Image (cartoon, grey):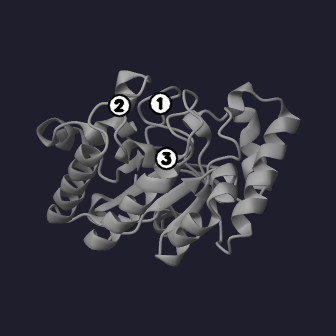
Amino acid sequence: MPPSSMESVVLTVDVEQDCPPFLQTHQGVEEGLPQLLALFQQEGIQATFFCTGEAAERYPHEVRQIPAQGHELGCHGHSHKRFDRMQPEEAKAELTAAKRVLDALGASVISFRAPNLALPEKYVKFIDEMGFTIDSSLATYKPPFARSWSYQGRLLRIPATVTSSILRLPSPIAWPILRRHPTPVLFVHPWEFIDMSRTRVRLDCRFNTGQKAISLLREAIRRFLDSGYRFVTLGEMGRQIDAISKTAARA
């Protein structure tokens, strides 16, 4: 674990269709994404956006705003299909298609996150072979329960800390959970910032969505800032970890 003196927090956004696999609309990209970009600009923070290739193809202008505003653009697969339900050739094709689309937007795409945080061990080598240097497809809260960052060959694996719906809980409940980890990696989805309350999806996909979600996220951001944390991109956290690892190796 990086030392607590870093006081870093990574906020990531999984840019995809609305609450997959239940819906195939993109209202979150159309309406939620601009709200998130505006919020981050207002609060002066940077984030990492894991975008599907299909979302980038449909909304190139919106996706270009991500690196244009100083954020990191990462890869979230092409179609948001689960990699643990793919054959090897299909998995390679998904990665190739997504990387081609995202690279065409002019950003340096080094970070990857698998849809549903489900990346079979046998496919990790594909991520490395495609030129990604950071993977965030593990989580501390689901099997295999990654407790901290680790290297897998040349690939740095940085797990997500909590599931996205935690950020839509009332602050007195959410904050003790969020601050439990010294360098939390959080994630949200643009569709959470449109009103999903009357949509026929799971309860965890529709409670406290829309403007409530925006207000709760803003409060969480300000709590982190007031507590001395600094928001960094996943790429920047990766560089911090690399520096620490090289220093330790020389000692």
Q: Are marks 3 and 2 in contact (CB under 8 Å)?
A: no
Label located before the other in sequence (1 or 3)? 3
Residue flagged by tag 2: what amino acid is it?
Arg
Name which residue type carries label 1. Answer: Phe
| Mark 2 element type | loop
Residue at the far right in the pictured view:
89
Mark nearer the N terminus (3 vs 2): 3
Above or below for 140 versus 151: above
Q: Label 3 sits on what residue type?
A: Gln
Q: Which residue is mark 1?
A: 145
Residue 236 position within the rendered picture, expressed as x and y whole percent measured from the top left: 48, 68
Between 197 and 127, the one nearer to me in the picture: 197
Where, by quadrant of the figure, is residue 17 drawn?
top right
x, y percent for residue 75: 63, 54
Which callout, 1 or 2, points to the residue nearer the camera?
2
Compute the Cα span from label 1 to label 3.
32 Å
What residue is shown with label 3? 27
Q: Does the image show residue 61?
A: yes
Q: Earlier in the sequence, mark 1 or mark 2?
A: 1
Inter-mark Cα distance, 1 to 2:
26 Å
Residue at position x 35%, y 31% in the image: 206
Q: Left or right? Give the position of 167 relative to 250.
A: left
Q: How far across and down, in percent of the image, does residue 225 sit?
A: 20, 64
Q: From mark 3 to mark 2, how far is it between C-alphas? A: 14 Å
Q: Secondary structure at mark 3?
A: helix
